[in-house]
Image: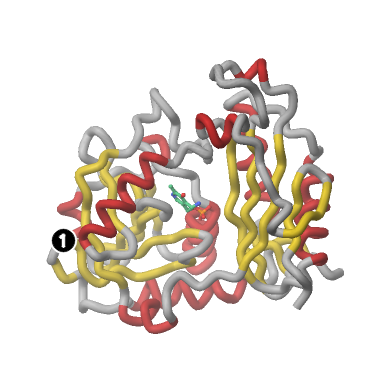
């Protein structure tokens, strides 16, 4: 395994030399955007979809990414190659860059681009069979009128507050509602429920990230013939669902066996969740950008 190198504004530097200014507005204000991406056997899974979301987030916050789409794709691939990496996680960060202490982004002459690749395993294999225990938390999702959760910004305090509540409850992922009390998403995962064979996920306009894994599951439902509805639902619907699962780049597709003390379905990963996970694992090495070809 090669020594870990990090892409920092066009240079490949060691971890010790990967340093960011204390005047960086990503650091000072959370002013920037990011992506979490997976590589499976040298395939950057859904690379285009991740870069589309990155460039959309950048447009929304008027951040000029100093690399073209193709250059960004190349930078991702080159960072993976230089780390002799085949499987793991990529963190792509574009910060507004160094400025002064004021919050005006006009004072930040150029954005900073950082690419880090690392190994990743957030849940043990048995968790995918047994399912997670989860809870709902009091922290509400940012309202889209204030800071739209569709923007994958560096400002993750909303999500971190959920994670703190999850930690206090001793669970790995928690369920956050929107300001109206509809289920929004987890701290870093989208949520799906299944009732009488129909798969439901909240529409992102109610306050959820347009997850790439979520999108892949929606496509798989279509391909496999599962009826899917994007519509708002409440915690009550979660409690009485036959199956519940989270989706995310790191978590993939993970069943939930209990929410707020209510057993979900049979209390382990249900048949549709299991089928979707199996089919998901078939596409991860295929659908994307091949680094070594
Ligand atoms: N919601 C939030 C808030 C997230 O941070 C993530 C992880 N990036 C997700 C959902 C899942 O999105 P994806 O499938 O693109 O990883």
Q: Is residue 89 left or right of residue 231?
A: right
Q: Percent x, y for residue 100?
A: 62, 21
Quarter holding the C terminus is: bottom right
Please give the name of the residue rendered at 27% of the width and 57% of the height, measured from the top-left corner.
166
Quadrant assignment, res 105? top right
Quadrant assignment, res 25? top right
Q: So how many labels did they put on this image?
A: 1
Q: Percent x, y for residue 268?
A: 27, 79
Q: Is residue 18 above or below residue 82?
A: above
Q: Which residue is mark 1?
A: 260
Q: Is residue 227 left or right of residue 130?
A: right
Please give the name of the residue rendered at 78% of the width and 34% of the height, measured from the top-left corner.
66
Q: Percent x, y for residue 187?
A: 37, 51
Quarter holding the N terminus is: bottom right
Query: Label 1 crowding class (10 Å Cα cut-off): few <14, some 14-19, many 20+?
Result: some
Please give the name of the residue rendered at 47% of the width and 63% of the height, measured from the top-left corner.
221
Front residue of 155/286: it is 155
Q: Is residue 35 left or right of residue 250?
A: right
**Picture colour scheme:** secondary structure
Front residue of 178/224: it is 178
Q: Is residue 222 above or below residue 29?
A: below
Q: Is residue 222 visible?
A: no
Q: Is residue 84 above or below residue 260?
A: below
Q: Residue furthest right?
A: 293
Label 1: which secondary element: loop
């Amino acid at each position: 395994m090669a020594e870990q190198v990090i892409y920092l504004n066009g240079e490949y530097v060691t971890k010790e030399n990967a340093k960011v200014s204390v005047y960086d507005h990503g650091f000072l204000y959370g002013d920037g955007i990011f992506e979490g991406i997976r590589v499976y056997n040298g395939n950057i899974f859904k690379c285009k979809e991740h870069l589309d979301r990155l460039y959309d987030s950048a447009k929304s916050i008027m951040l000029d990414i100093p690399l073209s789409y193709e250059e960004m794709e190349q930078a991702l691939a080159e960072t993976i190659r230089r780390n002799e990496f085949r499987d793991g996680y990529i963190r792509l960060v574009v910060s507004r860059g160094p400025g002064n202490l004021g919050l005006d982004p006009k004072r930040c002459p150029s954005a900073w681009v950082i690419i880090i690749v690392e190994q990743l395993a957030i849940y043990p294999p048995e968790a995918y069979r047994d399912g997670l225990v989860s809870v709902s938390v009091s922290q509400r999702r940012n309202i889209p009128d204030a800071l739209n959760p569709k923007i994958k910004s560096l400002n993750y305090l909303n999500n971190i507050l959920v994670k703190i509540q999850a930690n206090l409850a001793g669970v790995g992922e928690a369920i956050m509602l929107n300001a109206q009390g509809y289920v929004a998403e987890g701290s870093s995962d989208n949520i799906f429920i299944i009732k009488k064979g129909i798969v439901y996920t909240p529409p992102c306009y109610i306050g959820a990230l347009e997850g790439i894994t979520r999108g892949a599951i929606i496509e798989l439902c279509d391909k496999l013939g599962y009826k899917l509805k994007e519509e708002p639902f409440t915690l009550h619907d979660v409690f009485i669902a036959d199956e519940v699962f989270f989706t995310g780049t790191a978590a993939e597709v993970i069943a939930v066996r209990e929410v707020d003390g209510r057993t979900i379905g049979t209390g382990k990963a249900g048949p549709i969740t299991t089928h979707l996970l199996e089919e998901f694992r078939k596409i991860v090495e295929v659908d994307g950008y091949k680094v070594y070809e």
